[in-house]
Amino acid sequence: MSRNLHLETTLILIDNMKGFLKIVFGTMVGIGLWCVLSFLIFIISLVGMSASESSTATVRKGSVMRVNLTGALEERSGEVDPLTMIMGSVEAPLGLDRLKEAIDEAAKNDNVEGIYLEVDRFMGSSPATLQELRQALLQFKKESGKWIVSYGDEYTQPAYYLCSVADQIAMNPEGMVDWHGLASLPMFMTDAAKKLGVKFQVFKVGTYKSAVEPYILTQMSDANREQVTSYLSSVWGNMVKEIGASRKISEEKLNQLADSAIGWSKQNVIVEAGLIDSLYYLDQFKASLRKRLDLKEGKEIRFVTPDDVLAAAEQDSKDDKIAVYYAVGEIIDAEPEGIGSLQGASNIVTMPTIRELQKLRKDDDVKAVVLRVNSPGGSAFASEQIWREIQLLKAEKPVVVSMGGMAASGGYYISCGADKIVAEPTTLTGSIGIFGLIPEASELLEDKVGLHFDVVKTNRLADMGGAAVMGLPSRAFNADECALIQNYIERGYDTFISRVSAGRGISKDSVNVIGQGRVWTGEQAIGLGLVDQLGTLEDAVAEAAKLAKLEDDKYSTAIYPAEKPWFETMMEDKKESYFDEQLRVHLGSMYPFVQALEIMSRPASLRSCVYARLPYEMNIR
């Protein structure tokens, strides 16, 4: 009896368990289907958003193109995925390329009345990048006869330099104009490295080659101080001259205002000095803008974005093309990993760059190439390989270089063989020199970590530099090893000045005199024969068209390399990018030095220790 009851109870439990499992399984299937459906809807929505962004926008009569000056100005606009934009993780990138294109289209669009520069914590960019954007704004006024106005709570010095072209500069009644001059404040890590038990072995050619100084000195060398004083004076002179012309203020007065720290003065004093035209709250400024547009009280101003203006423009593609190839960032042998691998960071990587240039060489529709260089240099070996490919390209079609913020050291190396070089007056260029910077960590590894090394070798120099631990040599180079490396560096320098000599038609002795690692501005370089012409990217394109014998309006420009679409970058692994982003946040101003050190401490081979570069951050403010 009890056995039957127990069996019956067991059967009931099994039956109930089956029912429970059916419910659980059904729920899991339902959740899974809901997740799949939600994901599909999400993807469709993103694709729809992306498509809507690329659709033709309507720019109605009486529109004002609002340019939001915020964050940093980059050479090119990167593509940000819609999800990131929605979540507010980053702001839409501000790129010189699209801004200039939009300004040009706004000048031609009869429905655009003028440009409104809205300043919001604008940190700027390199002097030459700002100068090129400022020239585009001046050209807009000259060609179209339209107006430019600006408004901000606070004008940083880069923001004021740009906005000084405006017909009206307005500021919050409690706002500020930061006008203080230029300064370079390099950071020296020598003593910090010593405390860690790390020293640096330096091999270089060039009296002015200062990239190694942060790791071996505690202050600027006399030669470096001389060159920094020279190029800062040149850059500042350009800024003062251009602002003075726009604001009708003498250069002497502008310097006096900088010396007096005018930004800390009362707002009415800033107006009386001529830096600002009007003190308005934002609502008052918009009221004045409505009056300028002859709009009735309460009538909304028709603001459009640069992207709206570009979307409304007619795209006219012709068979004959001038390719504009952007070579932006550090010149490296291979894509970096770890520090410095932040997603979106630009680098000039040897093989991808060579492959792109080969495509342009073989493309019959491309009649000339403009190489847009904005680089502090990098690997000497990589620079030589890219130089070679540019020479092959030049043998078949004209090559013109347009220098952006900087085209120095390796950046100049890849530029020097072009048919023509165009630079901004404030471009930082030259720095013709080679160096090797190799850390030596015997004290760290032996005294602090407790590692010890021994060796058995078949030949005298088989253990050159000792064992490598995390990319750090375990001992200093001996005299014979140092002599070998120094000789290698000197041969590299001789090759560098030979490339410049052949490309620029200057004797090697003359190149050596103006070389020595010294940095020059564009306006200084033109007198030395390192640059042919001062001008913008558009001037370089015009020169390329002339060399290719292309008639005006008979060709179009095409941009290379193509930007990766957002949906492709969104699928990439971002773990290292997240780690790198956190390092940027926590290290702050020390990040560029740590980044450069990390890259230098993990060379793939001995030749990878040899550099033709500037410090990545020039630290000008």
Image: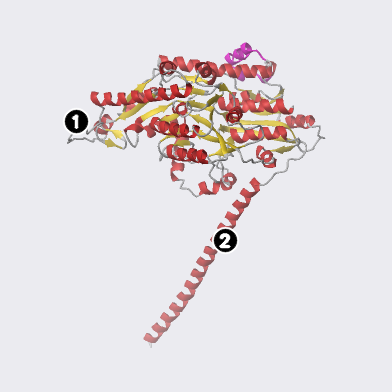
The magenta span reads 249-268
- Most prominent secondary structure in the magenta stretch? helix
Q: Position of residue 429 (x, y in %)?
A: 49, 23
**Quadrant location of residue 423?**
top right
**Residue 79: where, in percent of width, then height?**
56, 42
- Residue 368 position by quadrant: top right
Q: Which residue lies at the image location 46% right of the left edge and 18% below the top edge? A: 506
Task: Please tell me whether residue 195 belongs to the stretch shown in magenta.
Answer: no
Identified at 61% across, 20% down, the residue is 263
Q: Nearer the viewer, mark 2 or mark 1?
A: 1
Q: Is residue 189 visible?
A: no
Question: Which quarter of the figure is the N terminus placed in?
Answer: bottom left
Q: Residue 28, position in %: x, y? A: 50, 66
Q: Helix, strand or loop at disc 1?
A: loop
* For marks 2 and 1 on the same chain, the one whose residue lies earlier in the sequence: 2
- Residue 531 or 261: which is nearer the viewer? 531
Q: Point out the residue furthest to the bottom here.
A: 1
How many numbered badges does the structure rendering display? Answer: 2
Whether the residues at callouts 2 and 1 have beta carbons within 8 Å, the answer is no
Q: Secondary structure under badge 2? A: helix
Q: Is residue 260 a member of the stretch shown in magenta?
A: yes
Callout 2 amino acid: Leu
- Disc 1 designates what residue? 460
**Dot 2 corresponds to which residue?**
37
- Amino acid type, residue under disc 1 in the picture: Arg
Left or right: 465 with respect to 174? left
